[in-house]
Image (cartoon, rainbow, N blue to C red):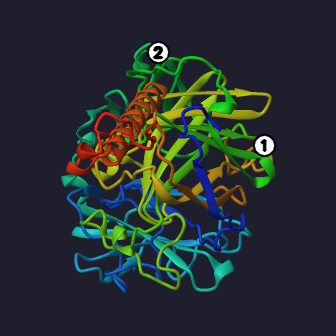
Amino acid sequence: MSQRIIQGSKMLHFLSIISLAILKLASAHVSLTYPPARKYDLDFLDTTRTGSLRGSPCAMNRGNISTDISAKDKINVTWSLGYAHRGGFKIQLLDSKGRELQDLTPEGEWVGDRINKNEQQTYELEVPEDLTCPNCILRLVRQATEWGEYKFKSCADVNIVPYNEWRNRCTGRGKPARGRKCKCNNPYYGDFCQYKNDCEEDKDCNNHGRCITSLGSSVPNKECFCQPGFYGQTCEKSSVLKSKKYNPADYQEIKQDGGNFRFMWRYVGGRADEIEGIIIAKTTSYVAVGWRPADITAQCRNFPEDAPPPLLRGNPLHPMDCQDIIIAKVNGDSSNIGDYYTRDRSTPRRDEVYGGQDDLTAAIGWEKDGVTTVIFRKPASDAQDSGKQDHNFDGKMTVIWAYGQRYFDTADFYKEDELKYHGGNRGKFTLDSVTEVFPQQRIILIAAISIIGFVLLIQAIHNVVNQCCKPKRTESTKDLGMENMSYGTHPK
């Protein structure tokens, strides 16, 4: 036990350790990246698990982003795919009310449906020359035939305009260049500057990290990996965690996956201040740990308010629902560590996507001998939380963990540190943190006050006893000449 823990109490008690096999996940995770999907680009929207918009064409409300597309032109439709399911895909055009107009892929076909595991995430689309469609919808529908009739979908709002009327505005992030391409402002990229990186060069990481290019297809394609002593999306924050050292005796430890994943934690500055967590995993891909209050209800999935909640089926909450998550990617002694949230089984997004902010107060990560180690600090109480995308690290919690696929075994689809489906490298457990933890100075103060209080109490009891037991002088004692004799003695 740490000396910071109050004598005689237990800091950690497992009410239950649940099997490493989480409820079966249907993890298509499909979301358009161009044209950009509707806000929010939650990628676990399928035909059977969508909430209030069940039966709707898109499972997501129309947003305020619309993409202009030219007739008689070729565009490269792209999407993010978290798992290579069996089956194919269709790209369809719908009118403003969500009614199907036509297939933009070959009519009546599922592209790539004969491939055992379809990894395709891009399709060059030739828009018909005579097609115009203002306020329309481009919809991607993706099969998952290993589960029967599962179909996942993602929608983008588009305006298809005549070829001669179309103007390349470069999405407002660059200037037209040769042909119909763009010269993009840093850090945007793509034919129409439709994608955004976190950095382009090392200097974009505030000279405190490296701008590393992902080998995968995820967006952003380039991210900042910060050197020890700095953290943040662009390494803009100084970290008090600078050393690749820690004392295991100072932490409570939880082992999962046969010891391949370990989570250690302690309070820093007291229960209401910060949680310091350590993730140690036998991987060189990403690592993640998340938590939510065990007594939270399914109402949490109504956040964000402007997105339809998923359906409740069977168990009201899935382990991934409403989770406050820390996700880290590490390259050597450099790290990219962030504060994420997921409302459902969709791929976690940074808190900023949901109107929050990254609440980490310090972070550091490193790799050595095929093992990734990450240390982070975060406010432990909701008094310091920035929004609904954050939870207390306190009381009884549902905790989840994961780390990435062995990318060298599945290099065609899973790339190192690419945030995609994690296969069997995941689990959950229930954690009950019920013990008050104080810094050493506070313990000494409380002990001193307790001792003083105890001494005063003994003194008070002594005074009361003396007062009660002291004999009273009476007339009879005076008459007998005994007034000067001590109580309990006899005359000579």
CA separation, marks 2 and 1? 29 Å
Q: Left or right: where does residue 412 sit relative to residue 358?
A: right
Q: Left or right: where does residue 342 sit relative to residue 69?
A: right
Residue at the image position 54 percent from the left and 33 percent from the top: 4
Name the spot of residue 24 as percent of width and height, x first.
65, 74
In this view of the protein, which residue sits in the foreground, 60 or 109? 60
Could you tell which of marks 2 and 1 lies nearer the N-terminus? Answer: 2
> Any mark on residue 208, and which?
2
2 or 1: mark nearer the eye: 2
Residue at the image position 52 percent from the left and 85 percent from the top: 314
Residue with the mark numbered 1 = 408
Contact check, label 2 and label 1, Cβ < 8 Å: no
Q: Is residue 101 visible?
A: yes
* Label 1 Cα crowd, 10 Å radius (few <14 / some 14-19 / many 20+): few
Residue 398 in the image: above or below residue 311: above
Residue at the image position 38 percent from the left and 59 percent from the top: 41
Q: Left or right: where does residue 286 sit relative to residue 486?
A: right
Residue at the image position 25 percent from the left and 51 percent from the top: 476
Name the spot of residue 283 as percent of width and height, x first.
73, 40
Name the spot of residue 210 as percent of width and height, x first.
53, 20
| Helix, strand or loop under label 1 | loop
Q: Is residue 122 visible?
A: no
| Helix, strand or loop under label 2 | loop
Q: Amino acid at mark 2?
A: His
